[in-house]
Amino acid sequence: MRSSLTLAGTLWAFLSLVTAVASSTSYFLPYWLFGSQLGKPVSFSTFRRCNYPVRGEGHSLIMVEECGRYSSFSAIPSLAWQMCTVVTGAGCALLLLVALAAVLGCCMEELISRMMGRCMGAAQFVGGLLISSGCALYPLGWNSPEIMQTCGNVSNQFQLGTCQLGWAYYCAGGGAAAAMLICTWLSCFAGRNPKPVMLVESIMKNTSSYAMELDHCLRP
């Protein structure tokens, strides 16, 4: 079984898979922002949250200690976080598609050419740019009432208050940066140039098949 990738291309496929998995996993985990409410730890991502208050008996607030996503897209606390959810999700999907194709290129001959590898690198750059844009949009939602209640009522845009950024936020940003810089560069050397003999054989094969079809059509 021959690969359609060079040695640099194999490294590119591996790093593409690592960055795609790191960014996508971080996107789904609610550990982008850490704070506390009613004496309980609280954490957020863009569309998920761990631990939230509900009305108990006597209209007192109690904390439900479980993780889950918001009930609807409109229930996400701010417009900035809604935009962040969309663009980051799109970027993760793009990185995963490229990573899947790159891994298949390790197992299949003539799947990824030099030009195809560069096009896939451009797609990785766009995916990383989308995730980076999502990370940049995320602080714009820190002034929503829900986040302010968790961050000591002193948070604002780009001001965390008593909260702190979580490891998943840094992991998503780091994966996006690696995809944009390292993977995009390696993709330029990932695919193999087609051999002249293989090109000639392909042209001759196609020409022969066309000639046979033409001959069959012209027969009475």
Image (cartoon, helix red, strand yellow):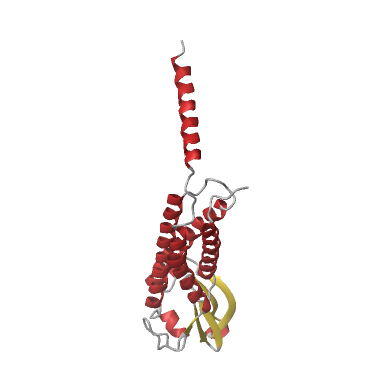
In the displayed orientation, state which residue is furthest to the right.
1
Front residue (pair 220, 27)? 220
Q: Which residue appears at 42% of the width and 53% of the height?
A: 119
Residue 39, quarter of the rendered image = bottom right
Vertical placement of residue 135 versus 110, above or below? below
Front residue (pair 137, 50)? 137
In the image, is 68 to the left or to the right of 217? right
Q: How many numbered discs sit on the rendered protein?
A: 0
Percent from the top left, x then y, of residue 205? 50, 31
Percent from the top left, x then y, of residue 148? 42, 84
Vertical placement of residue 124 versus 47, above or below? above
In the displayed orientation, state which residue is furthest to the front.
197
Vertical placement of residue 208 versus 116, above or below? above
Q: Which residue appears at 47% of the width and 61% of the height?
A: 186
Percent from the top left, x then y, of residue 179? 46, 65
Q: Which residue appears at 52% of the width and 86% of the height?
A: 36
Front residue (pair 174, 28)? 174
Percent from the top left, x then y, of residue 150? 47, 84
